[in-house]
Structures are given as structure tokens and as C-alpha cells.
Amino acid sequence: MRLAVGDRGNGRVQVFNFRHTPAIPKDVTGQASANEIQVSWKPNTETYLDAYKIYRSDSPAGEFTMIGASSEPFYIDRNLPSNRTFQYRISSQATGGNESALSNPVTAMTPKLIPVSPKKIKIEPSEKQMTLSWLPNTEPFLDHYRIYRSRDAASGFELLKKSDKTVFVDSPLPDETVYYYQINAVGKEGDESPAGEVVFASTPKAALSLPPVEITKLALSEIFASAYKSYESNPLGKIVIKNNTNKTFPRMKLSFSIKDFMDYPTELDIPDVPAKSELTVELKPVFSNKILDVTENTSLQSEIALTYYTGEESRKRSRAASP
């Protein structure tokens, strides 16, 4: 603001410039949350106020440096490290005028980024291994999980593995051995959750010697002679082939026959059966006309033969059943 004063005696005009100085902001507070601090204060009432200036010190004895400005009576200081103390002072700036003195300092401390302990930990023992799974943590600052293991929970746990997944397979393990596990979550700055629940299980006994491939299930329906041709498209039954090995089994053939009522066996090329898995195969016989002679007192005998190869040697497994 300008003020002009006339001096008639000396024949001159004197001009005075007035610069406003706003009041120092009051009632400054700091509210900390994850990686940020919100500084708030009571708004000034001057009509010539332009903005507020925010100053920060990273240590109690450090200098205050301007980090930002705000037209509102608050400021959010983001992307701060966790578990750190900061001090803030606020000034007010007049439009085309002066800056006030700094307010009294306010102190705030960012919290540690400690995740909660993982929930609903499950353990599933199987041959020579344990499979652990748990619900994923939802904290945005989660970095990874730590899997701890012990043979005796009372003697403490040792770190087994770090993982960013929520499923972990511990193998190979000896048979009939008890293991204890504990899963902790770790934040991006290294803060670890409190010790969570302990789960434990024993690895099972060693499996009995099994054939590489076997027919584990065989189911046949009742035969209706009058509808014998429909079985060429609608299955009479099904079998389940199980691969007990750790590798895919190829080159298998299946033969299915019902004695005296089929001119030729039904033969099928079986697709590859993956390791440790099962495959269901439908049985669709092609009957001869002799099937029309079947009555409810007729005894029917069927045979299933599965041919597979170990190296260049062929082997066969058979099952018999009655519809």
C-alpha cells in the first residue's frame, strides 16, 4: 500500500510504501501416519494473506529448511522414512508484503511399518514334504515373508526361507518326522511382525511299493440288450488310470472286452498321463448281435487290459469285472 504526502513549503510530495506483515500461525499440530505427517494450524484472518510456508528440521538441533507452501491451513509431508522424528515451524506470507516470524516448533514421529502376523496358516504333510499356505497380508508396505522351522518348538526356531509368495513347500524331508513352523511378515523397511501361530505336522510313513501305472477304479453300468448300439456313443462305464511315478507316462494302450458278446475288443490309445496324476477313460463297447440273447440271468464277464512301456519293455495290468 502507498501513501503520498504533500510538502507545500518545500514544494515536494513524499511517497511512503507500507508492507503488511501477517500474524504468526498458531495452534500448530502434527499428526503422523505411515510414511507421512500432516501439519495443521489455526487459519489466519488477514485479507491480504497469500500463503503459508512450511519449514522442517530432521533433527532436534538441526536447522529448519522450507519444504513447501500451502494456501490451506494444513500441509501433508509425504514419503518419509518410518520410525523418524521431525520438527515443523510455519510462517504466513502477505500478498506483496512481508513474511511473519516462524511459529513455535511442533514435533511428530512416523510410526514403524510393522505388518500384522500372517493369518490362517495351513500345513499339509505328504510324502517327504510339507506344504505351507496362509492368507496374504494387505498392508501396502509389505515386502516379504519369513518362514521359520524347528524340530522342537520349545528350543526356538531357525530362519528357513524368505519368500514373497503365500505358499511354500519344504522338501525333501525324512519320513515320520515332526516339524514345527512359524510365518512372519516383513515390511519394506525391515520391520518384522510379532511371532504368529505355530503349526506342526509329521511327514507320513514311506509309501509301499506301487506299480508305475495302475487301474485304480473300474465302474460298469447294467447292460440293456435292446439299446446295445447306443453304447457306441454313450459310455457303459469308466476306469481311472493312475500314474504313480514322478514322470509323464506316454505310449499306453487300453483294451476292453466282454467275453462272447464282442467280436473284437475296444482298443484305445491313451494320452500322456502326467506325473502323480489320474486320468479317467470312458468305456464304449461295440457289441455283436449276440448281445440280444442276454437275459437278466446271463452272466457277463469283462476284462480291461492296460499296456504300458518301461524303456523298451512292454508290461500289462488287467482288471476283470461284471456289469
Image (tube, rainbow, N blue to C red):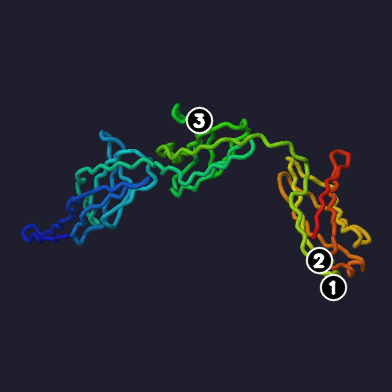
Q: What whole-number distance in Å separates the C-alpha atoms at marks 1 and 2? A: 9 Å
Q: Which residue is mark 3?
A: 150
Seen at 19% across and 50% down, the residue is: 27
Instruction: Work out which quarter of the rendered image holds the N terminus and state it.
Output: bottom left
Which mark, by number, is residue 226? 1
Q: Is residue 133 above or below residue 96?
A: above
Query: Toward the viewer: 232 or 298?
Result: 298
* CA separation in Å, label 3 and label 2: 58 Å
Left or right relative to 87: residue 80: right
Crowding near the residue tagged with mark 3, few <14, some 14–19, many ≥20 C-alpha atoms within 10 Å:
some
- The amino acid pointed to by label 1 is Ser
Which of the pair 39/96 is nearer the observer? Answer: 39
Badge 3 element: strand
Q: Amino acid at mark 3?
A: Ser
Residue bearing the label numbered 2: 223
Q: Position of residue 80 (x, y in %)?
A: 37, 43
